[in-house]
Amino acid sequence: FGMAAIFQLLALFALGVLVFVLRTPYRPLVERPTPTAQTWIVWRQSNYILFGVFGIVYSIASFGTDGLLTLHIAETRGVGMQTIGGFGALRGVGALVGAVFFALFYPRWGMRRAQTWALLLLSFGCLLPLFDWPLMIQAFLWGVCWAFQETAFVTMAMRFSRGALAATFFALFM
């Protein structure tokens, strides 16, 4: 159907989510206290700083690999745009699987073990382009690795973002 049809379909997906969001009534869960100078002291605690550094390093590895994959595939395998599109679609399917895997294992493992696996999967995923495996298997596996670690990071950011400035901390981490 061509690229125009694909982008139109993606726009419809986004609008579908928008309709859902607009139809969902807003109900605050709890009253939040007014932020004070004391709230910002939390930011200076070492575990928050360490988490921020982790976020920067993980982002370079994760988004760097994700952004360079199609360029690498096009240069090393000489594939066309249709194959790259299929790669992206299968990566998306793998991402759904990776996020579900995290949701299943996190309650059993806890954050430390889940994050350890997330980083191991990210490292493995970053090496996938170096293997001479079928392209679509690599796409699926990269999606699983990427989404597992991304979901782990977002979960950690949400955990660290409690308190009066939760949204601000979450935004800074992201």
Image (cartoon, grey):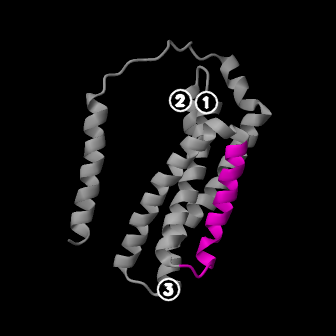
Assess whether mark 2 and mark 3 are in contact (beta carbons under 8 angstroms): no
Mark 1 vs mark 3, CA separation in Å: 43 Å
First in sequence, mark 1 or 2: give its number. 1
Residue linked to disc 2: 167
Q: Amino acid at mark 3?
A: Arg
Residue linked to disc 1: 161
Q: Write the residue at 67% across / 45% down.
A: 114
Q: Nearer the viewer, mark 1 or mark 3?
A: 3
Overall secondary structure of the magenta section: helix
Mark 3 vs mark 2, CA separation in Å: 43 Å
**SS type, badge 3:** helix
Q: Amino acid at mark 1?
A: Ser
Q: Write the residue at 61% across / 71% down.
A: 128
Q: Is residue 150 visible?
A: yes
Quadrant assignment, res 141: bottom right
Q: Nearer the viewer, mark 3 or mark 2?
A: 3
Q: Write the residue at 61% across / 21% down.
A: 163
Residue linked to disc 3: 77
Q: Quadrant of the C terminus?
A: top right
80 lies left or right of 48? left
Q: Residues in magenta?
A: 113-133
First in sequence, mark 3 or 2: give its number. 3
Spot occupied by residue 75 in the image (x, y as percentages of width and height): 50, 84
